[in-house]
Image (cartoon, helix red, strand yellow):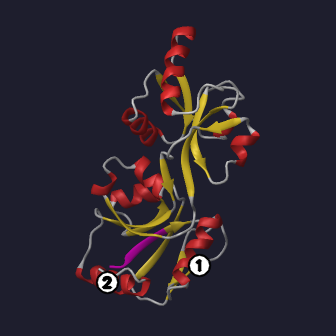
C-alpha cells in the first residue's frame, strides 16, 4: 500500500506545490497532458501523486481516500465540519496567501465595522421586509464568524461565479470572499470592513485522520516528514 498525496491539479497552486516539495528533495510531476490527472513522484518510494481540484481535496481527506493533501486552509475549515477531527494540519507552506473578508458598498459611509453591519442589516430588514443578502462561497465560515460577532438579520446567498459582481448585479447587498490585493473589490466599488479578516488562508499540507494507515504507510510517512523537515 502506498501513501496517496493529493495536490491541486493546475495553476499557480500546483506549480508552487511542486516547487515546495522539490526544494525538499521530493520531485512531483504531471504525467502527460493537462487533461490527465495522474503524476509521478521521485526521491521517495511508496508515495503516489493524485491530482485533484483544490476544492475536492478536503472531501477526499475526510473520506480517507487520500492520506495527505495540499489545499487552502480556508477550504478545509469551510467544507469540513469539525475539521480538526478529520485532518491534521502538518505544515503551512508559505504561499497561496489570501484573506477571507466581508465587504460592503463604498457608498455605505456609515458602515465600517461588524457592529455597523449589524445595525445596517436590522434597518435593511425593517425597510425592505427581507434580510440583507451576503453573497459567498464560504457559508460555514461566514455563518460562524457572524454568529460569534453578534450579527443577525442577514441571509447568505450562494455565489459560484464572480462574487464581487453580485452587488452591482443587485443579487446581494454585501459579499464575503477571498482576496489577496483588494484590487477587484475596489474596481467594483466595495470596501472591506475594518478589523481582523474572517480567516487568513494559505496553502497547507494536511494529513488525513480518516485514511487507513498500515505499518508500511506509517514508515513512508516518517521518511517523508524527515525529508520535508517536519519532525514528529
Mark 2 — residue?
222
Q: Is residue 31 visible?
A: yes
Element at badge 2? helix
Mark 1 — residue?
19
Q: Is residue 35 visible?
A: no
Q: Is 182 on the left-hand or right-hand side of 206? A: right
Residue 196 within the magenta-colored segment of the rendering: no
Element at badge 1? helix
Instruction: Report if the CB atoms under discs 1 and 2 are less than 8 Å apart.
Output: no
Give the total number of marks visible in the rendering. 2
Could you tell me which residue is drawn at 73 percent across and 37 percent down? 188
Q: Quadrant of residue 4?
A: bottom left
Could you tell me which residue is drawn at 30 percent across and 66 percent down? 211
- Among all residues in the image, which is located at the extreme right? 187
Q: Is 47 on the left-hand or right-hand side of 96? A: left
* Residue extent of the magenta highlight: 1-6
Q: Earlier along the polypeptide chain: callout 1 or callout 2?
A: 1
Amino acid at each position: 500500500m502506498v501513501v496517496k498525496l493529493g495536490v491541486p491539479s493546475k495553476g499557480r497552486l500546483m506549480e508552487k506545490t511542486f516547487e515546495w516539495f522539490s526544494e525538499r528533495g521530493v520531485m512531483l510531476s504531471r504525467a502527460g497532458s493537462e487533461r490527465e490527472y495522474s503524476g509521478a513522484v521521485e526521491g521517495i518510494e511508496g508515495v503516489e501523486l493524485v491530482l485533484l481540484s483544490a476544492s475536492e481535496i478536503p472531501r477526499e481527506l475526510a473520506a480517507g481516500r487520500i492520506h495527505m493533501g495540499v489545499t487552502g486552509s480556508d477550504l478545509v475549515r469551510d467544507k469540513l465540519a469539525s475539521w480538526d477531527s478529520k485532518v491534521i494540519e502538518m505544515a503551512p507552506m508559505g504561499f497561496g496567501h489570501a484573506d477571507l473578508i466581508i465587504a460592503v458598498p463604498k457608498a455605505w459611509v456609515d458602515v465600517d465595522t461588524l457592529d455597523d453591519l449589524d445595525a445596517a442589516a436590522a434597518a435593511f430588514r425593517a425597510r425592505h421586509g427581507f434580510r440583507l443578502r451576503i453573497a459567498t462561497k464560504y457559508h460555514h465560515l461566514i455563518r460562524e464568524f457572524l454568529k460569534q460577532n453578534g450579527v443577525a438579520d442577514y441571509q447568505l446567498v450562494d455565489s459560484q461565479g464572480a462574487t464581487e459582481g453580485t452587488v452591482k448585479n443587485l443579487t446581494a447587498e454585501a459579499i464575503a470572499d477571498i482576496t489577496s490585493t483588494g484590487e477587484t473589490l475596489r474596481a467594483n466599488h466595495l470596501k472591506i470592513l475594518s478589523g481582523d479578516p474572517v480567516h487568513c488562508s494559505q496553502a497547507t499540507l494536511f494529513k488525513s485522520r480518516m485514511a487507513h494507515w498500515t505499518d508500511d504507510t506509517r514508515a513512508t510517512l516518517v521518511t517523508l516528514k524527515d525529508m520535508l523537515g517536519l519532525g514528529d
